[in-house]
Image (cartoon, rainbow, N blue to C red):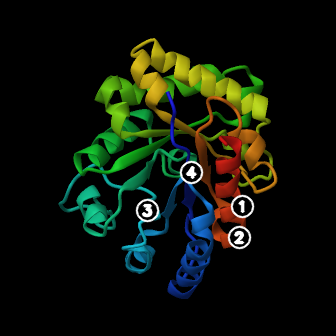
């Protein structure tokens, strides 16, 4: 089954209105050279209106949130709901990023609830899984990512993957400059797909699994050429328009 590559930019807690405008303008200027790749940017909540205004009608770039609350509305000061994201035209939302898990204490159960909240709001969750360096060195990578994935599937059902994306992001490679080798990344992506196939082979064949963790223009093509890697969730490199476009073009060439 052919899976359309997806490259999503996670801007994290970076940017001003002026910086967002400049970045989006730069990406739009080169997006026509990126055919047959879905491109999404995920700015901080407060910059979504600015980004949405500039991208609305482009037809080439989608946008999404970096997180959401488990509730659709209510007395949850400081939180943002799925319906709020949809109101500003978001189509995607990142769920369970390792920074949310480690810095903000989000458990597997919370991530599974946020995944459900996203789909209830007609958003596509990009659900992140990944191991720490200590877990990798202890030989626990497969056990960790299987546990994280199972929490989502047991809460929401394997059929929910028809409206979701998975991102494998080894914690030790996020923002560190260290990157899993293409072989290491492919090994985990293949394992995830096999675990899904044990539940539903068709869902496993169709779901897109992205790689994230210090992806750059210089290493993207080799990573994206792996058979079970369907694009990337890009952090720091997504803050530079030309670098981000280079990564997007790498997804085209890798599948060309």
Q: Earlier in the sequence, mark 4 or mark 1?
A: 4
> Could you tell me residue 77's position as x and y percent?
28, 66
**Which residue is depicted at the point 39% across and 30% down?**
152
**Which residue is depicted at the point 32% across and 51% down?**
123
Which residue carries the number 2 mark? 242
How far is mark 1 from mark 2, CA to CA?
Answer: 6 Å
| Residue at disc 2, secondary structure | helix
Q: Earlier in the sequence, mark 2 or mark 4?
A: 4
Whether residue 240 is visible here, answered yes or no, is: no
| Residue at disc 3, secondary structure | strand
Image vertical order of residue 55 relative to residue 138, above or below? below
> Could you tell me residue 126's position as x and y percent?
45, 45
Which residue carries the number 3 mark? 62
Image vertical order of residue 63 relative to residue 146, above or below? below
The mark closer to the camera, 4 or 1, is: 1
> Could you tell me residue 232's position as x and y percent?
61, 47
Tell me if mark 2 has few (under 14), some (14-19) or many (20+) residues whose alpha carbon lies within 10 angstroms of its own: some
**Which residue is depicted at the point 59% across and 72% down?**
27
How far is mark 4 from mark 3, CA to CA?
Answer: 23 Å
The mark closer to the camera, 4 or 3, is: 3
Tell me if mark 1 has few (under 14), some (14-19) or many (20+) residues whose alpha carbon lies within 10 angstroms of its own: many
Tell me if mark 4 has few (under 14), some (14-19) or many (20+) residues whose alpha carbon lies within 10 angstroms of its own: few
Which residue carries the number 4 mark? 99
Q: Earlier in the sequence, mark 1 or mark 3?
A: 3
**Which residue is depicted at the point 35% across and 62% down?**
90
Which residue carries the number 1 mark? 246
The mark closer to the camera, 2 or 4, is: 2
The reply to whether callout 1 and callout 2 are in contact (CB within 8 Å) is yes
How far is mark 3 from mark 2, CA to CA?
Answer: 18 Å
Please name whichever residue, 65 or 103, is drawn nearer the observer in this view of the structure: 65
Whether residue 68 is visible here, answered yes or no, is: yes
């Amino acid at each position: 089954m052919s899976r359309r590559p997806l490259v999503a930019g996670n801007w994290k807690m970076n940017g001003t209105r002026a910086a967002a405008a400049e970045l989006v303008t730069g990406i739009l200027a080169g997006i026509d050279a990126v055919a047959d790749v879905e491109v999404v940017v995920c700015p901080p909540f407060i910059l979504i209106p600015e980004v949405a205004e500039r991208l609305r009608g482009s037809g080439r770039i989608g946008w999404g949130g970096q997180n959401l609350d488990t509730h659709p509305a209510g007395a949850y000061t400081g939180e943002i709901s799925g319906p709020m994201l949809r109101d500003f035209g978001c189509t995607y939302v990142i769920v369970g990023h390792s920074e949310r898990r480690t810095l903000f204490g989000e458990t597997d159960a919370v991530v599974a609830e946020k995944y459900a909240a996203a789909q209830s709001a007609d958003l596509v969750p990009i659900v992140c899984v990944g191991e720490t360096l200590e877990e990798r060195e202890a030989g626990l990578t497969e056990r960790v990512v299987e546990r994280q994935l199972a929490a989502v599937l047991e809460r929401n059902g394997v059929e929910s993957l028809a409206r979701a994306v998975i991102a494998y992001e080894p914690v030790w490679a996020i923002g560190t400059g260290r990157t899993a080798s293409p072989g290491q990344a492919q090994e985990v992506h293949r394992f995830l797909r096999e675990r899904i196939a044990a539940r539903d082979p068709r869902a496993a064949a169709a779901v897109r699994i992205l790689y994230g963790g210090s992806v750059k223009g210089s290493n993207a093509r080799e990573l994206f050429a792996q058979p079970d890697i369907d694009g990337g969730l890009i952090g720091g490199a997504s803050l530079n328009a030309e670098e981000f476009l280079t990564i997007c073009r790498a997804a085209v060439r890798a599948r060309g």
